[in-house]
Image (cartoon, grey):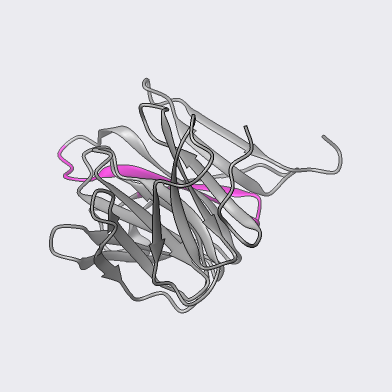
Amino acid sequence: MRFKGHNSCVWDCKFSPEGHYFISGSHDTTSRLWCINREYPLRIFSGHQSDIECVEFHPNCHYIASGSSDCTVRLWEITSGNMVRLFLGHSSAIQTLCFTKNGQYLAAGALNGLIIVWDIPSGREKIRINAHKCSIRALTFAQNNLKDSTMSLLASGGEDKLVKFWNCDRANENCLVETIESKQTPIYYLKFTSSNFLIASGISENV
């Protein structure tokens, strides 16, 4: 099926955890909610001032997050289509988003290598990390919390060909746990399995 609605390039798409719905983010500054058996969008989320680079479903599927080249992250209620949170703090285009598994925190990685994690209920910034020397392309939280920790382990991947692990309960750059170098390719995708094995992928001219 061909899905119709955006009037410019689509930069990101994500399926809901159930798999029946998906969201898209576009150069036309909107994100849209779709059903896999309907040609046109169910909902349009409008408010960003520039390209929407990344989108993500909240774990409870009642909300979506969108990250934009306007340096903001917005949280939208799916039922009403209303924006319920505006997250500020970045000064560079947002490239990737990730929720903790319990849905309390939202992390955003930017073009300048900065990660910011916000507490969603309060809207307050939890931590900021100057994580990479260039663009961050992937973020993922571990399935289970660290021992004696209130937040999950966070992994980040960037165009610097590094995967880094962060304990977000520690202060800023002191939260670095480990760094792994891919050597061959920038990191464009990261995902923890249910057993907390990390899957990483990238793009290389030699692969």
Q: In which quarter of the image is the N terminus?
A: top right
Residue 14 visible? The answer is: yes
Which residue does the image show at 30% across and 54% down from the upper left?
106
The image position of residue 4, as x and y in percent, is 59, 48
Residue 158 in sight: no
Residue 79 higher or lower than 113, as above or below: above
Residue at figure coordinates x 53%, y 45% from the top left: 13
Which secondary structure dominates the residues rendered in magenta? strand
**Near-viewer residue (102 or 179):** 102
Tell how many labels: 0
Please provide percent x and percent y for residue 16: 39, 35
The residue under the point 65% across, 56% down is: 159
Residue furthest to the front: 39
- Judging depth in this view, the residue of 185 and 84 nearest the camera is 84
Q: In the rendered view, tell whether residue 194 sits above or below residue 111.
A: above
Residue 151 in the magenta stretch? The answer is yes
Residue 103 is situated, as x and y percent measured from the top left of the image, at 23, 44
**Residue 11, magenta (yes or no):** no
Range drawn in magenta: 148-166
Q: Position of residue 163 (x, y in %)?
A: 54, 46
Work out which residue is located at the far right of the displayed protein and give it. 206
